[in-house]
Image (cartoon, grey):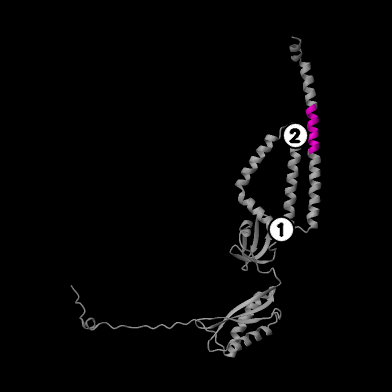
Amino acid sequence: MQQAANDNNPFVFQQWLSANLAEKSLDALAALAIALVGWWLAKWLVRGLDRVLIRFQMDDILRNFLRNVAFAGLMVVVFVAALQQLGIPTTSLLAMLGAAGLAIGLALKDSLSNIASGVMLIMLRPFKAGDSIKVAGQEGVVEQVRIFTTFMRTYQNELIVLPNSEITKSAIVNLTYKPVRRIDIAVGIGYDDRIDKAREVLLQLVASHPSTLKTPEPAVLVTGLGESSVDMVLRVWVRTADFGNTRSDLYEGIHREFARAGINIPYPQRDMHVYHHPASAAEATAAPPANQV
């Protein structure tokens, strides 16, 4: 009876409530302190990571991405620690967050694939901004590599936005990766023309052009005997920046110099013969049918 009276005493309940409030207040203050200190430590660690990445000359896009991921991971740890200080069970919460993360990951698998591909492109650097590349059936100049997509500009000044996953799944041809490139020009001469004379004309044309390189040495090779021509190829090395203009000049020069030297450039020709078969004698002498009224 005495115990029941004490339990129903408002003063006792107030003492219990005051003690629990004081305890909970201390836990809340401790959790807040953990959150603030953890936030400060996370910021400090992320700044340290950023300095290390800058020292290793990491790309700006990848550096920002890694910095944000590291800060988010550290803040998750701080949040869990603060919840534990408040006495909130975190096991079920972490399980729920894991299930939610799995569901989100499955729903965003294409976006996550683009992120992973973007990280690979930035780290491996098969190309950089300003390079001319061929990839996924597209050709153009790279303008920017982002985490999700890569921006390219065509030679007609059109914008191409490619998902990074499409790039990593395709063969990448970097046209400007090396400082020099080789120009291969296929040309045919007639069977009545001399091969040595055609080779001499081509090599003189190359030697007279200011953008062609002497090393590696240019060459003229016979590649086959076609239906109407002797097939040859001119191989000459130029600086990558001079590739397009030099190739155009060489095509024009070949047409001009071959005409001066009297060398023919054959092209496919077809002769068409039309035969007219006269009507038979019976058909020719038969009277036309009379018109019926």
Q: Magenta residues, as a range? A: 23-34
| Amino acid type, residue under disc 1 in the picture | Met
Q: Quadrant of the C terminus?
A: bottom left
Report which residue position mark 1 lands on. Answer: 123
Query: Which residue ends up furthest to the left in the rendered image?
Result: 293
Viewer-nearest residue: 259 or 56 = 56
Q: Position of residue 183 (x, y in %)?
A: 64, 76
235 sits left or right of 86 in the view? left
Q: Residue 249 occupies which quadrant of the picture?
A: bottom right
Q: Residue at x 75, y 12 (%)?
A: 3
Query: Which residue ends up furthest to the top in the rendered image?
Result: 1
- Judge whether 269 appears above or below 55 on screen: below
Q: Quadrant of the N terminus?
A: top right
- Crowdedness near tag 2: few (<14), some (14–19) or many (≥20) residues, C-alpha within 10 Å: some
Q: Is residue 146 visible?
A: no
Label 2: which secondary element: helix
- Judge whether 282 appears above or below 172 on screen: below
Q: Is residue 23 visible?
A: yes
Rounded to the nearest whole Å, what is the CA distance between mark 2 and mark 1? 38 Å
Q: Residue at x 61, y 81 (%)?
A: 221
- Judge whether 236 appears above or below 140 on screen: below
- Crowdedness near tag 1: few (<14), some (14–19) or many (≥20) residues, C-alpha within 10 Å: few
| Amino acid type, residue under disc 2 in the picture | Gln
Q: Which mark is residue 84?
A: 2
Badge count: 2
* First in sequence: mark 2 vs mark 1: 2
Q: Residue 15 occupies which quadrant of the picture?
A: top right
Q: What predominant SS class does the magenta segment belong to?
A: helix
Q: Do the residues under discs 2 and 1 have CB atoms within 8 angstroms? A: no
Q: Position of residue 147 (x, y in %)?
A: 68, 55
